[in-house]
Image (tube, rainbow, N blue to C red):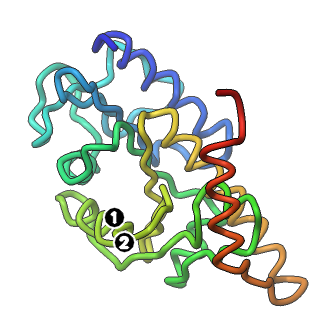
């Protein structure tokens, strides 16, 4: 993919965050990595979503140095870059403060795997990591630590919000949408009673079917 195409895609995908009620005002961000050059396209800091264009996306290298763009990149840039440096399989990163998922993060709780949709998409619980301050690599370090040994493309960070990863930016956005969807359902289920966790063997089967059989091939 050409960098110009990646800028257009990352810009376009940002519209899906408010459309799916995953962000408020200017919070949240998406980045995508160009597999050819290794350069990263990320949202500029503090701009409202209706102001975003392909032209004002910022291009940085894997260490967060601005390569192209007149605006300052997202305050989460160094954490995005850390994730990319540690995970060669990741081509997209998304950060949101979506309401239900962030409620779990606020109390430091993982989202238990009590739904077939979670077995499909996440292959188990959505883990909750510790707290880290914004601005440096610390959040990225905590995301990597939290996802170690997990099949989940999503991690909650205590007192903060949601980070998702994917093979590309669109896959990471999908994971963010699904994270909020299952978080809302689990929260609602807890108002009715105590949701039952799926058996690990069943989770394995669900995840395998979803990743190897479901859809068009």
Give the CA separation, mark 2 to mark 1.
Answer: 5 Å
Residue 158 in the figure: left or right of residue 24: left
Q: Residue furthest bottom?
A: 194
- Residue at the location (17% across, 22% down)? 37
Q: Which residue is mark 1?
A: 143
Q: Position of residue 24 (x, y in %)?
A: 57, 48
Residue at 66% of width from left, 66% of height from top? 100
Q: Which of the 4 quarters of the picture holds residue 61?
A: top left
Q: Residues within 10 Å of mark 1 (few under 14, many from 20)?
A: many
Q: Nearer the viewer, residue 89 or 85?
A: 89
What is the quadrant of the C terminus in the image?
Answer: top right
**As displayed, is residue 8 above or below residue 75?**
above
Name the one closer to the observer, 3 or 43.
3
Residue 185: x percent and y percent?
79, 66
Residue at (29, 28) in percent of width and height: 41
Label 1 near label 2: C-beta < 8 Å? yes
**Location of mark 2 (residue):** 146
Name the secondary structure under disc 1: helix
Viewer-proximal residue among 155 and 133: 155
Establish if 20 lies above or below 72: below
| Quadrant in the picture for residue 18 | top right
Residue 28 percent location from the top left of the image: 45, 47
Please name the residue shown 24% across and 36% down the image. Answer: 73
Quadrant assignment for the N terminus: top left
- Find residue 44 and report its horizontal and vertical position in percent: 31, 32
State the SS at label 2.
helix
């Amino acid at each position: 993919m050409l960098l110009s195409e990646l800028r257009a895609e990352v810009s376009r995908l940002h519209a899906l965050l408010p459309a799916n009620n995953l962000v408020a005002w200017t919070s949240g961000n998406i980045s995508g990595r160009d597999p050819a050059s290794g350069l990263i396209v990320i949202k500029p800091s503090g701009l409202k979503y209706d102001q975003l264009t392909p032209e004002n996306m910022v291009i940085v290298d894997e260490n967060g140095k601005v390569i192209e763009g007149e605006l300052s990149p997202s305050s989460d840039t160094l954490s995005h870059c850390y994730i990319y440096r540690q995970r060669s399989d990741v081509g997209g990163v998304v950060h949101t403060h979506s309401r239900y998922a962030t409620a779990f993060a606020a109390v430091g709780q993982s989202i238990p795997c009590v739904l077939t949709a979670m077995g499909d998409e996440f292959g188990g619980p959505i883990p909750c990591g510790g707290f880290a301050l914004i601005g440096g690599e610390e959040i990225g370090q905590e995301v990597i630590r939290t996802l170690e040994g997990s099949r989940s493309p999503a991690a909650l960070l205590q007192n903060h919000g949601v980070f998702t990863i994917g093979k590309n930016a669109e896959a990471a956005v999908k994971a963010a949408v699904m994270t909020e969807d299952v978080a809302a359902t689990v929260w609602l289920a807890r108002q009715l009673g105590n949701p039952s966790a799926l058996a690990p063997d069943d989770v394995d089967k669900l995840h395998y079917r979803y990743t190897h059989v479901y859809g068009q091939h």
